[in-house]
Amino acid sequence: MIEIAATIPENQRQRAGEIYYEAFRRKLQPLVGKPAETQQTLAMGFNLDMAIGALADGELRGLAGLHSAAGIFSRVRMSDCWKQLGPLRGLYAWAVLNLFGAGAKCPPGHLRIAAIAVDEKARGQGLGSRLLETVFDKARREGFKAVRLEVVDTNPRAKKLYENLGFGVVETHAYPITSGWLGFSKEYVMVKTL
């Protein structure tokens, strides 16, 4: 049985790093390398109060990391990057991980989904949709006017899911240089008005 939790329990911090890394491996691996160390660094930078978790038998299976004026889900510290990855790779990782973690600015009145990730063994069971519905409920309860997120052009299944849930594209950012390097060349900013 899946339980949706308003925050991610502290004892699931490392698991959150593993799930996040796996979901965004294509973006992170070429930039940072060292998967185990990167997962640990990510986990140390998570603000678990800015995340919703999907748990089965007490183990995290999925998460939605949030960003608003109240806080941001992921912000890694330089010292953690250096400790886990060394000085040169650590400096580079700090810049890259904070770029992906912070992402686009969140306009007033919007709750931004900075990350949504489901354990690969739990995909196809509706966890992503349940996490999204929980985010919508939270946004309405807390008085947000809209929910926003970004999705890359090489993830058409996710884009279609978001469209089916009422999101529409409001901006498109082109990154032609990244297609061979990170595997995507466009990012769609999508918004769902509540």
Image (cartoon, grey):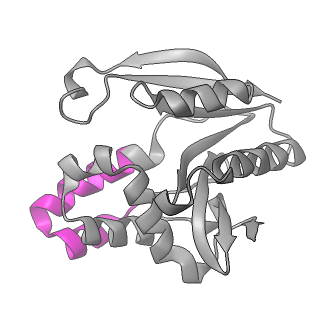
Using residue 143 as the reference point, say whether residue 157 is left or right of it. Answer: left
> Seen from this angle, which residue lies furthest bottom?
11
Can you say which quadrant of the picture contains the C terminus?
Answer: top right
**In the image shown, does 82 or 192 lie closer to the viewer?**
192
Classify 74 as above or below 153.
below
- Viewer-proximal residue, 106 or 165? 165
Q: Is residue 68 above or below residue 146?
A: below
Task: Examine the structure image and report whether residue 92 is included in the region drawn in magenta.
Answer: yes
Question: At x 75% / y 34%, what residue is drawn?
Answer: 109
Instruction: State the extent of the magenta-drawn residues as a range.
Output: 75-99
Counting from the top left corner in percent of width and height, residue 73 is at 55, 56
User: Where is residue 17 drawn, in percent x and y?
Assistant: 43, 67
Return the x and y of residue 171 as percentages of the image width and height: 53, 16
Q: Is residue 45 visible?
A: no
Principal SS element in the magenta part? helix
- Give the residue at x 47% y 16%: 172
The N terminus sits in image quarter: bottom right
The answer to whether residue 147 is above or below residue 35 is above
Q: Is 21 one of the magenta-colored residues? A: no
Where residue 174 sits in the image (x, y, percent)? 35, 17
